[in-house]
Image (tube, rainbow, N blue to C red):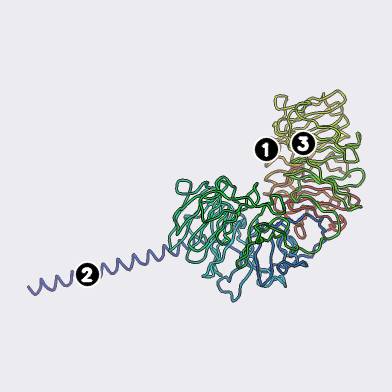
Amino acid sequence: MRRSVIAAVVVSVAIVAGGALLIARTERTLRTSRVEALEQDRVEFDLSDVHPTVSLFSQLKVRDDYSSAVVFDGMTVLAGPDGLTVGTQGEPGARRLRSGVELPAAPITGLAVGVPRGGSRPELIAATRGEGVLLLDDVSRGTVRQLRPRDAALRDATAVAVLSSGEMLIGTRTKGLLRWDGRTLAYFSAALTGVPVTALAGDGAEFWVGTRDRGVFRWHAGQMDHFDQSSGLPDEQVESVALDGGRAFVGTPLGVAEFDDGRPARMLAKGVFAHALAVEGDRLDVASIDQGIVAVPLGQEGGGRRVNPMGEAVRAESFLAVGDAVFAVTANGLLEHGRSGGWTPLPSAAASPTAGPVLAERNVSALSFGPDGSLWVGYFDSGMDVVDLAAERTRHIEDDHVFCVNRIAPDGVRGTMDVATANGLVLFDAAGRERQVMTRRDGLIADQVTDIAFTRGGTVLATPAGITFLDASGVSSLYGFQGLVNNHVYALASDAESGTLLAGTLGGISVLGNTAVLHDATVRRNLTTKNSGLKQSWITAIVAVPDSEKKGQRWFVGTYGAGVVELGADGQFTPMDGATRAMEINPNAMLVTARHVFAGSLGEGLFVYDRAGGRWSQVRAGLPSLNVTALAEHEGELYVGTENGVAHIAEAELAP
């Protein structure tokens, strides 16, 4: 029996030891898994100081375009594409921190104020579209740090919030929600990884995350709740979130959902596109896209009444709460909600306007100079401006046809300014008076005109359906059935001496001859990725570059995905050091001058080719945006169109 007892004890000890060992191994495995998961969730980043750029560029003034505001250090801070405007609340005389100069060249998309973990005082936090997050501890001195993820998609921030714990939340356009704890940057939760974030609201105990197409998420007590159309939302596109105690209001294009302690309660402002929200006492202010500011009484079910500041529906981009007061943030500044129920503008918080003409818009798509020296500026989502630089006057032109401008080209033979738009070709005289509109009804192969070129035989138009020729004999067209490599033509370039015309398309380049008589023009050769060394078939821009050594015509070709390549007389493409790489050249954003070739890129600034030295260089500093969309030159001055306005510089300043 003694041996049996000893054996039983030994077995028991072995079992206990084995169990302890198993538990230890399990805990070690779980701990390792947690560490590995944390490592997988971590995001590589750079945290550095932002130093102001000494810019040689000057910028044409653009109308204000504010989108958000906060109060920081007793000062109102307004944000938008131009950067930050800082001034004492309600008083004129502010200071600007400009995109591309004091700040990185990226629009501000959201603001927050809080004490980040590891900090000792509140900081101003700014989300940017393309450059991560900016942190300012003293706006009067302009001290700026930049939290910049190395993944470009993670740098596209849409919203920021600082929790009571000091952790900072960063919403991104396509990659989900990030968390910054002062030392590490990581994805917040697998449930939110990859979601397109539009709005953030809350504190450490609870916060809400609005998304572009997946409804709204609520984080509380360590768990995540999700609400979509099947569980209380009028639409799965969330534009805004506002919190008031235990209530949450979620704005969508079809109205507002109210939640009480995380449970769906009721629908408000049905049918109103709720772009921004603010709770003001017993009223919910709803900034709509097309109905002005709607006030919804919270004590009763249903609609609301329309409140039109200054007698007209003013679109508010967001709201600013200061104590018990609520201000509406508009493109032009702040509106104050008065006791009478109306909204009135506060004195401008912006600095005094600088001298010079003011552009109507900022998203530039085309630039050209008229014969009188006026600057013609086309816009992606608007009409165009004719700017008299000498008289400092701007005239805006916009109608059913002058809208979504793709190209502006002066016709030296007819003395017209030809404007290619998404709705046809519009011809203006030298004084800027509209003379003629041409569409499919007039013989064009398509209404949308993407580029214009001139040959000895007449005018050539690029369209998504082929090429249209305008000459003395009338209107004729050429498309894929007649040999064009692809019907979708983006760019044209001609050589008057040889009579050659190049058409850049979605599928490569077609080389046309016989352009002295356009209706006899034919496709001589098609150059594609299969037969010419071309690396990307999508051609966005082409320019003819005169060869001083007479080795034959040179063509510089912009592509979507491979930068700029050179096309020689032998029909072969040659890479160019410094410009042939994985990047996008914007449609028709190339220009040749006596000294340079310029190419505008999507997100990487301006590329400059020194024709004498045969070298490319890249220019980023001083541009209001790194998305360079259009180029023009006049009397030695280079004008650079971007998605954030127009900058200009003496071309001589760009010498290597």
- Where in the figure is residue 621, as x and y percent of width and height? 76, 60
Out of 247 and 131, give the one closest to the viewer.
247
Dot 3 surroundings within 10 Å: few (below 14), some, or many (20 or more)?
many
User: Considering the image in quadrants, where does the C terminus appear?
Assistant: bottom right
In this rendering, the answer to whether 230 lies above or below 176 is above
Q: Quadrant of residue 526?
A: top right
Instruction: Verify CB contact (< 8 Å) between mark 1 and mark 2.
Output: no
Picture residue at 31% right of the left edge, 67% below the top:
23
State how far apart marks 1 and 3 are (Cα): 36 Å
Image side of residue 232 versus residue 340, left or right: left
User: Considering the image in quadrants, where does the N terminus appear?
Assistant: bottom left
- Inspect the image, locate mark 3, and give the three-letter code of the amino acid beneath it: His
Dot 2 surroundings within 10 Å: few (below 14), some, or many (20 or more)?
few
- Inspect the image, locate mark 2, and give the three-letter code of the amino acid beneath it: Ala
- Where in the figure is residue 584, as x and y percent of width and height? 69, 47
- Inspect the image, locate mark 1, and give the three-letter code of the amino acid beneath it: Thr
In this rendering, the answer to whether 571 lies above or below 473 is below
Dot 1 surroundings within 10 Å: few (below 14), some, or many (20 or more)?
some
Q: Which mark is residue 401?
A: 3
Picture residue at 88% right of the left edge, 25% below the top:
472
Query: Among all residues in the image, which is located at the extreme front?
Result: 340
Q: Which mark is residue 575?
A: none
Picture residue at 86% right of the left edge, 59% below the top:
355
Q: Earlier in the sequence, mark 1 or mark 3?
A: 3
Residue on which the image places disc 2 = 14
Image side of residue 419 versus residue 328, left or right: right
- Where in the figure is residue 486, as x and y percent of width and height? 69, 32
